[in-house]
Image (cartoon, grey):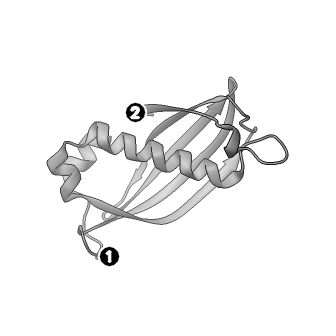
């Protein structure tokens, strides 16, 4: 993995079982990906590159709980012509918690039209 982001679990993110409610894991992943793009893609490149989510899968191993610090590691697992797979692995309380695979499609900014992934984006995120 090429980037790490940390998020502390807030009380309101937990459900009646005392663990993070499942939808919040995807919010953690989205926040991590945004920080990753901002850290590795220069502003001009960031403005010229856009993606749309095609598919996301989440596999849970152990729960995250209130006040845990969730450490999220992120990297590209597969490059295609117009799509790529981003894997985000989360650890909470010193144990593996979940793994998420997000499939993105590169689109022309301001449209939904798939376009090839720019080479400089591949280099920056690899």
Above or below for 64 versus 83: above
Q: Residue at x 66, y 30 (%)?
A: 92
Q: Furthest-right residue in view?
A: 17
* Quarter of the image that includes the C terminus: top left
Residue at the top extreme, as displayed: 94
Going by the image, does 81 lie left or right of 90?
left
Where is residue 99 shown, x and y percent of the image? 61, 44
Residue beneath the point at 45% across and 49% down? 86
Does the CB distance between marks 1 and 2 fall below 8 Å? no
**Corner quadrant of residue 48:** bottom left
Placement of the N terminus among the 4 image quadrants: top left
Most foreground residue, 11 or 40: 11
The mark nearer the N terminus, 1 or 2, is 2
85 left or right of 114 in image:
right
Residue 15 is situated, as x and y percent measured from the top left of the image, at 78, 48
- Nearer the observer: mark 1 or 2; the answer is 1
- Residue 76 appears in the figure: no
């Amino acid at each position: 993995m090429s980037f790490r982001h940390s998020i502390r679990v807030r009380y309101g993110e937990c459900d009646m079982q005392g663990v993070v409610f499942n939808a919040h894991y995807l919010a953690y992943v989205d926040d991590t990906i945004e920080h990753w793009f901002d850290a590795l893609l220069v502003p001009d490149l960031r403005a010229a590159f856009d993606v749309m989510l095609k598919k996301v899968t989440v596999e849970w191993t152990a729960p995250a709980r209130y006040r845990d610090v969730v450490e999220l590691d992120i990297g590209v697992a597969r490059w295609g012509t117009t799509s790529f797979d981003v894997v985000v692995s989360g650890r909470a309380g010193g144990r593996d918690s979940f793994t998420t695979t997000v499939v993105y499609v590169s689109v022309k900014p301001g449209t939904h039209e798939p376009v090839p992934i720019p080479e400089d984006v591949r280099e920056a995120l690899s």
